[in-house]
Amino acid sequence: MPPPVKLAIIGGGPSAFYVASRLLSLLPLNDPMSPPLRVHMYDRLWAPHGLVRYGVAPDHPEVKNCTNKFDTTATDPRFHFFGNVNVGSTPLHSIPHALHLPLTSILNNYSHLLFATGCTMPTLHPAIPPSVCCISALSLVHWYTQHPSRPPPPALDKISHLTIIGQGNVSLDIARILLTSPSVLRQYDVPEHVLEVLSRSTIKHVSIVGRRGPLEAAFTTKELREMINLPEASMIPIEPNLLIPPSGVTLTRQQRRTLELLQKGSKNPPGSTPKSWSLHFYRSPASITPPSSASALDMATLTLAHTRLDPATCRAVPTGESSTLPTSLVVTSLGFHADPETTFFDPALRHLRAYGGRIACSKGSALKNIYASGWAANGAKGVIASTMIDAYAVASTILSDIVPSSKAVITAVPPPPEMEIAPDELLNHHPDLDALPSEIVHGIKDGMVTQYDDWKVIDAEEIRRGRALGKERERMGWDEVPSFIALSRARP
Ligand code: NAP
């Protein structure tokens, strides 16, 4: 039988759960060929599921169905979840209540380590840094999902025009939420305090700005169709010449559908609704001048450099012209990158230095038994289904190190040929399978560290509270969690 395996996973989002679930099922509990195995998952957030809980738009509840699978994974007795634990070299200031666990505590206690830490930082635009009139998309998303970092609510009651920079799915998620009536959103997982702010919103128009053209837009057709069909908003028609594809170009199915949808325009004719939205192509932010007074009528001035597509590189290049757009608030939605504080962060890649699921040292050799999956390994791209496919491949790579003869190994992603598995002394090759870092033992006792059973009790309570309000769930905040857990643990 192979030697015991004790895997620590840092991160508790979809990629972490998919790797855990795959590995646990590839090494069945009662199979004599399976080594003794423990999978311990650590998340700096007190609730599990990462982006599924704190990123998916509330009006897309079906996307969250993957949590049923994660619940099943958590019933495996070899699996444990520890929430509100920030593993890293520095304490985390954005979540002051998270227990700080140095990486060395993990290295001393585990034989294998997976980074599934995601891309938690918003990519900002140097020309328009965060200010009173410019916030990141992440701050808005974290506000409406009640993320433990608790960003302030946007002053939607003082805003008539909002501009989103970037044309990805996160931009459309935000535009859709802001242009949908709170009476429709009320049925979903939208906290009451968020609904209250949304119900006071005075937003009349949302402009969504992209530096390239309709054929290069990062959003997908499903999300565009949802915008087109918004019941209470209409789209400003796009200049027809922008919707003519260059001659000789073969369009992909997605590009063809995008052009068709944009040519057709919104379900509601322009001007027929109190709210509207528009797509602005070939525009890139150059500067922003704040309003001269705090009056709600006074707007900031956003200067947009005009761009064109360089056919050779497919990149946006400036034409030298510019124009201005008066706007109340700018939201930058330019994608995400990994936290530079994370060990093995590569500044050039803006995510961890990982190849084929293996973490590499700075000289390029793969580090034995240290892995990365999901956005932490590949950057912030793809939907949950693609994250699952990547996670399954990483699970196979881990399996290939544990049981090289396993048939499931054939799907493992091999490391590039020039990469050697570097021998290392980083991890503990003979860990006590059931021991926990002492910080975690104390944190559980103090009620500062959450476990999956705690989460399931809170999950049931959130759903119960939601049902009483006629909605999917009403979220609990950390201010209530420790006392609620203490009460539920004390119950016989
Ligand atoms: P994204 O898809 O990468 O879109 C980023 C946008 O920002 C693009 O329009 C990009 O333009 C623009 N951008 C980046 N840097 C810029 C700069 N310096 N100046 C001007 N524009 C800039 O990122 P995302 O919307 O954050 O989404 C991340 C991932 O999550 C994507 O894979 C997305 O599909 C997925 N997601 C899916 C859903 C869903 O399925 N409903 C919902 C949310 C997110 P260029 O294209 O020109 O670079």
Image (spheres, helix red, strand yellow):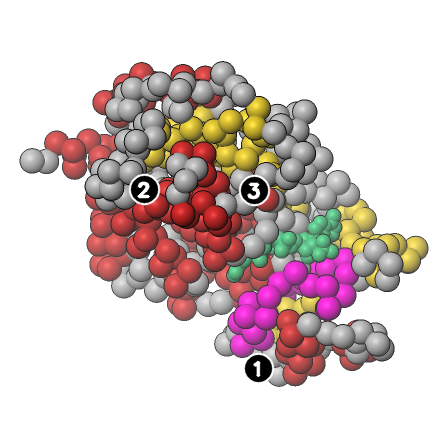
Dot 3, how many residues are within 10 Å of its Cα: few (below 14), some (14-19), or many (20+)? some
Q: Residue furthest right?
A: 320
In this image, 51 relative to 286: left or right?
left
Q: Amino acid at mark 2?
A: Leu
Q: Is residue 318 among the parts visible in the rendering? A: yes
Q: Earlier in the sequence, mark 3 or mark 1?
A: 1
Would you name the residue on which mark 3 appears? Answer: 414
Would you name the residue on which mark 1 appears? Answer: 267
In this image, 87 relative to 139: left or right?
left
Mark 1 secondary-structure assignment:
loop
Q: Amino acid at mark 3?
A: Pro
Q: Residue visible at 46% across and 67% down?
A: 181
Q: Position of residue 177 (x, y in %)?
A: 50, 61
Mark 3 secondary-structure assignment:
loop
Residue 217, quarter of picture: bottom right
Q: Position of residue 402 (x, y in %)?
A: 40, 34
Residue 27 is tagged as 2
Magenta residue span: 202-229
Dot 2, how many residues are within 10 Å of its Cα: few (below 14), some (14-19), or many (20+)? some
Check whether the beta carbons of the residues at disc 1 and disc 2 lie within 8 A of each other.
no
**Per the image, is 232 magenta?**
no
